[in-house]
Image (cartoon, rainbow, N blue to C red):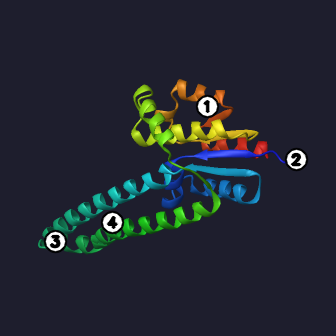
């Protein structure tokens, strides 16, 4: 009988894929494992929502920078010594404006894809109540508290043979109490992706 492996991920996993950042290629390999094998990808519902705030905020910040850069370049262009250099820098503002829209579209596409591959852990009243307690007790942000309690609640209901929580947010989630609680539920916390991927492959 093939061993079942539950792989819990959080918001950074979604962002990494959508923004095509450093570990996105490794994440693509992980998605392939989930599509082809016994591994099951599990995402707290909040982790599909939270990235939108990040992407939208970045887009607004870049738009503001773009407007400032455009203004300053237009002022520099009035001085002959800078006109040639200014002409070569005009693409910066266009890149800043374009990247925001493109990243939002990639996030939409990534969410649609993950909804087809992953199991979504629903946001229930029980999870929210537990998150309110965890936020104060463990000094977590509201979204991180919801992610944590979503995983803990799912672990209490699921009997998979192997369970891992793949998490890039070591700053908040390396809390010994969090790690111990997960270990008690048979769930291994893995922060380094190379260690995560190698560990998962060893299980398979």
Give how far apart the Cα atoms at labels 2 and 1 are: 26 Å
Q: Earlier in the sequence, mark 3 or mark 4?
A: 3
Instruction: Find disc 2 in the rendering and name its residue.
Output: 1
Q: Position of residue 107 (x, y in %)?
A: 47, 63
Residue 84's tag is: none
Tell me if mark 1 has few (under 14), some (14-19) or many (20+) residues whose alpha carbon lies within 10 angstroms of its own: many
Q: Position of residue 47 (x, y in %)?
A: 49, 50
Tell me if mark 3 has few (under 14), some (14-19) or many (20+) residues whose alpha carbon lies within 10 angstroms of its own: some
Say which element carries label 1. helix
Q: Earlier in the sequence, mark 1 or mark 3?
A: 3
Mark 3 and mark 4 residues within 8 Å of each other at the beta carbon = no
Q: Earlier in the sequence, mark 1 or mark 4?
A: 4
Mark 2 and mark 3 residues within 8 Å of each other at the beta carbon = no
Q: Is residue 67 visible?
A: yes
Q: Is residue 191 visible?
A: no
Say which element carries label 2. loop
Give how far apart the Cα atoms at labels 1 and 3 are: 56 Å
Residue 182's tag is: 1
Give how far apart the Cα atoms at labels 2 and 4 are: 52 Å
In the displayed structure, does residue 13 sit left or right of residue 203?
Answer: left
Tell me if mark 4 has few (under 14), some (14-19) or many (20+) residues whose alpha carbon lies within 10 angstroms of its own: many
């Amino acid at each position: 009988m093939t061993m079942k492996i539950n792989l819990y991920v959080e918001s950074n996993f979604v962002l990494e894929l959508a923004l095509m950042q450093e570990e996105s290629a490794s994440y693509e390999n992980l998605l392939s494992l989930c599509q082809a094998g016994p591994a099951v990808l599990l995402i707290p519902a909040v982790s599909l929502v939270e990235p939108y705030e990040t992407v939208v905020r970045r887009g607004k910040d870049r738009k503001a920078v773009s407007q400032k850069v455009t203004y300053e370049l237009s002022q520099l262009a009035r001085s002959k010594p800078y006109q040639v250099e200014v002409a070569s820098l005009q693409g910066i503002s266009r890149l800043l404006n374009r990247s925001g829209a493109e990243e939002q579209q990639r996030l939409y596409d990534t969410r649609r894809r993950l909804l087809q591959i992953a199991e979504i852990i629903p946001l229930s009243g029980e999870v929210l109540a537990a998150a309110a307690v965890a936020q104060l007790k463990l000094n977590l942000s509201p979204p991180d508290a919801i992610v944590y309690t979503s995983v803990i609640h799912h672990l209490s209901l699921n009997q998979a043979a192997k369970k891992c929580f793949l998490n890039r947010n070591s700053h908040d989630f390396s809390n010994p109490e969090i790690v111990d609680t997960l270990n008690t539920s048979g769930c291994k916390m893995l922060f380094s992706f190379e260690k995560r991927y190698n560990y998962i492959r060893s299980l398979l």
